[in-house]
Amino acid sequence: MISHIFVLVLFSALVSIFFGVLTRDTLHEGARISVILFLSMVGVSLALAYIMAPFPLR
Amino acid sequence: MSPLRTLLACTLAWLVPGGGHLYLKRPFKGVTFFCLVLLTFFLGLSLHGRAYLVDDEQPLLSALATFANVGAGPLDLLARTWTYQELAYRLPPDGQPGHDELQARMRARVLEPSYEYGTTFILTAGLMNILLILDAFDIAIGRKD
């Protein structure tokens, strides 16, 4: 059985590391941007899921 | 850097994720991008994702998605062979030869619960590689350090 939260965390981690390395030249700065992006992606996704939860599926 | 070397850097970036950065003497970035793009792509395949086909019923969206897939370079050939057992880029119109076979192979993946995730991962790997080509271009022409 697929874990949706695991896929969300995995996807966010891959994308945030990618943009951290792409947009910054130093390891420290890249890591900082990656952490900020990762927390933002997971946080916003969970917040949207929480807001949408009361809505019916159909 | 000469236009020929810029072209070579961009071509290498398309052929091998991170290859352009390796050629431009950025080994850390090159190896990191190689690992990230390949990991994203193969996770997509393992989650039953598929490569998109240009479909006449949704021409713009399907063409953009197919372009994003092709951005992954030779990996896209693998995704297409994996998904359709052939190198298909266009879904023939309904009633034309090949339409039913391709659609049946597509539907076999759509029925998997992780299909949407897998397809997103494969698309993302292609888009990442397109960004890497543009980044290699910027570095090669001196717009970026």
Image (spheres, coloured by chain):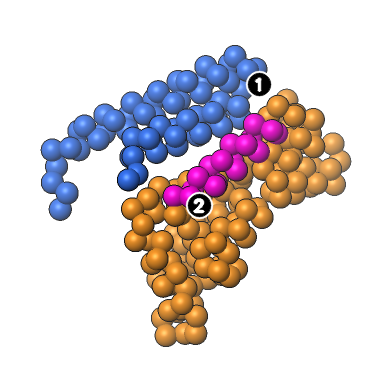
Chain colours: A blue, B orange
User: Is residue B34 on the magenta stretch?
Assistant: yes
Viewer can see residue B72: yes
Task: Name the front one of labels 2 and 1.
Answer: 2
Q: Where is residue B42 in the image (x, y as percent from the top left)?
A: 54, 47
Looking at this rendering, what residue extends furthest in the top direction? A28
Residue depicted at x 56% and y 25%: A20
Choose between A29 and B115: the one closer to the eye.
B115
Looking at this rendering, what residue extends furthest in the front direction? A1
Q: Alpha carbon of mark 2 to alpha carbon of mark 1: how far?
A: 31 Å
Tell me whether circle 2 and circle 1 mark residues in contact (CB < 8 Å).
Answer: no
Badge 2 and badge 1 both on one subunit:
no
Label 1 residue SS: loop
Residue depicted at x 33% and y 40%: A4
Q: Is B2 displayed left or right of B71 in the figure?
A: right
Chain on which label 1 sits? A
Q: Is B144 displayed left or right of B113 in the figure?
A: right
* Rendered image quadrant of residue A53: top left
Q: Position of residue B99 (x, y in %)?
A: 46, 78
Residue flagged by tag 2: what amino acid is it? Leu
